[in-house]
Each structure stands twice: as structure tokens, then as C-alpha cells.
Amino acid sequence: MIAPKRRALLAAAGIGALGIWAARPRANGAPHTPYFADLAQALKRAGIATPTLVVDRAQLLRNAAQVMANVKSRMDVRLVVKSLPCQALIDTVAAVTHSRKMMLFSLPQLNLMAKGDNDILLGKPMPVAAAASFYQHATAANDGFAAERQLQWLIDTPERLAQYRDLARQQALDLRINLEIDVGLHRGGIPDLDTLHRMLAILQSEPRLQWSGMMGYDAHIAKIPDLPGLRTAALTHAREVYARFAAETLNMLKSPNRKPSFNVAGSPTYRLYDGSGIENELSIGSAMVKASDFDLASLDDLKPAVFIATPVLKVMEKFSMPYGVEAIGTAARLWDPNQRKAVFIYGGNWLADPVSPGGLRASGLYGTSSNQQLLSASGVQQLQPDDIVFFRPRQSEAVLQQFGDIAVYENGKIAESWPVFPATG
């Protein structure tokens, strides 16, 4: 006979086990929404059966129009090319923003974009050897581009400015110089007025260098914890620094031949500026396509316009781990119904997350693969080989250049194919 005390312990253990079992994950997921079902059919009709970057042109245009409605013509917009690395993509957005102002971050893209009426500001300081290479290879292919009027080199230290001065003297170049200032991000840039004064002295003494403006990047503001007062204080500090540095520069230097470019912001922070300060242009790129890293309250009036589409190669009715550790896979299936099936896709391991059909996720047990990634599934998704799975990129820079030509979705079909710029650092 089992003693009452032991019987009570066994009963409690049984109840505890039932409670643990009851607490296991519930099956979730769903087939494609109508939007993604239509997009999948459009891709199949177009004969696309490899991993492909898709841009929804209508949503892209809506996003661009909404950005401009928010800016309200109070400041100029400068398009960030690393986030829109495709000439047709840039031209589509530029037609809405009415801007040929571009921000570039690499020498290869500078060589591509130095043409026509583009007004270019480098978004990071470039080694002076890169600048020398640009001028060495600049040819008539630059299509009438006048670098002395249309190109601003970003400079962050007295030492780099001295290098550019020497380049200008050696090659008889007239260089426009935009000064990078530190407004709180602490990722370089001019940190104090003493350093600024040293740089202004170099600009005053060299007629081949023309000061053209300032750039202060404020990405830290959007990423600061949303505690009372912190973001407001960071914004106030950034604007005070900007105003102080700009005033000091305008006091010491002659005004440039054209309005200085007082560049600021990025997609997460562009709405913090209303044109009331010295800042007069906003850098915006990722907001136009809205990758998932930009799911922020400041961008909640914009919608995703870019996706990765890839075919399903295999659907395993039972998720299984490799030989020798099959028991782990069995345990995972029993515990979590969302790991019942294994879906292997064409490619994978991108800086992106599954978005449709719902409930798919990368397998932390099986690991990642850039060849055939495994996604675990409950089976509710009803996926079969040759079906399409959609991912949402976390960012647009670099990711948009991984898949070759962009498939442009419009009016229920793949309407165009847009070549992307070559991948660059």
C-alpha cells in the first residue's frame, strides 16, 4: 500500500507534469494573406523561381509621397544611395521628392553617380587616396558633371583636411569641403570648437578649398531608451551643438557661393526637424522602402515596400535532426507543434525574417544555411514544394544588392526589372 504522504507527492508530481505539458507552445501560423498570395502568383507567372528582391512600386510611391507630406517643403531632402542602391529606384523616388541631391558612401557608387545634375555629398570621410582615384578616372563619361560645383567631400579632422589641401594643390583641383561634426553620436566628427578653429584656419589659407556646409548625424537619438526626457535632451543637445558650430564657421569664413548644405538626420529622425533651426536638408533613404529595422513610431505612417521571395524546395512531414541526434528533433516536435514540419527553402541566411506565410521561423536547433535554410513550421501554412516564402529585410543597404535585378510588382504583375548597383563596401 502506498503511504498517504507518498501518494500526495505522486499526485502533485502528476499535476505538475500536466501543468508543464499544458504550458507548451501552441500551434500557430496561417497560409499567405491575399496580398502575398497575389504576389506569389505574379512571380510564378513571370517565371521567377530563384531568390528575388521584390519592390512594390505603388507602396514605394506612397511612402515617398508621405515623407514629402511630412517634410512639407520646410527642408530639402537628400536621398541616401546606399539605402536605395539602384538607379531606377532612385529615379522613382526622386520624381516624387523633386530632388537630385544624393548622399553617397563608396567610391564605386560615386563613380556611377557623378553625372548629370546630381548634387553629391559624401556621407562618410573618404581616404584621400579614394578622392585622388576619383579625379584620376573622371572622364567625359561623367556626362557633364562638374565636381567643383556638384560634389562635396566630407572631412572630419584637421589631418584629413590637410591631406585634401595637398591633393588640391598637387592636382590643381577646386574642392568643396563639408565638415562632419559630432552632435552626440560619438562616431567621429569634429568634437569641439578648438578643433573646428584649426580646420577653419586651413580653409581660410587655401583658396582651392571652399567650405560648402556641415553634416551632423544623429542616429543615437532614435536608439536612446525611451525614458522620460532622454530623447528630448539628446535632440536639444544635437541642435545646440549644430547651431554653435555653424555660427562659429559662418563668423570666420566668407559665405560660400551658394547656400551651405546644413545636412542632418536620417530616416528614423527626420521628423524631429521642422526647419526652424540652421539645419536645411534631411538625409532620407530607408524610410522609402521601410525595412523592419525601421519599424519605429516615427515611421508608423509608412508601410513595407520591399520583400525577398524564395521558392520552397522541400517539405518534410516530420522535423528531424541529423543522424546521431534524432532524439532531439523528436523531443522538439513533441514539445513544440511549431516544429512539426521542416521547410527547406532556396537560399537563406539573409539579414531578413520570414513574413509570409505566418508562423515560419529559422531553426535554432538545425542551424542556418545560405544554400538551403530550414524553416520550422506547424503545417498550418499548407506549404508545398515550389510555393513561395516571403522574407522582410531588416535593412535596405547591402541586402537589396544580393539578388541581382529587382522585380517590380505593380497592378498584380511583375511589371519591370531594375538592375542594382554592384555590391560595394
Image: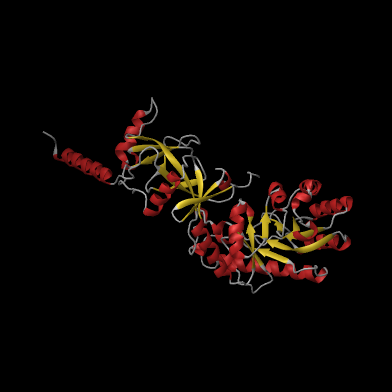
> Could you say which is closer to the camera, residue 176 or residue 19?
176
Q: Position of residue 80 (x, y in %)?
A: 63, 56
Relative placement, left or right, of 286 versus 410 is right
In this image, 108 relative to 312: left or right? right
Residue 224: x percent and y percent?
Answer: 55, 60
Q: Is residue 293 above or below residue 338?
A: below
Q: Relative to 29, does residue 321 appear above or below in the rendering?
A: above
Residue at the far left in the pictured view: 1
Report the front residue among 289 and 296.
Answer: 289
Please provide percent x and percent y for residue 65: 54, 65
Residue at point 70%, 70% (across, down): 243
Which quarter of the rendered picture does the C terminus lie within? top right
Q: Is residue 120 visible from the viewing direction of this image?
A: yes
Q: Is residue 226 visible?
A: no
Look at 39% across and 41% down and name the residue there.
Answer: 387
Q: Give the percent coordinates (x, y) of residue 270.
A: 59, 65
- Looking at this view, name the residue that lies furthest to the top: 324
Identified at 79% across, 63% down, the residue is: 211
* Residue ID at (71%, 48%): 107
Q: Name the quadrant of the N terminus.
A: top left
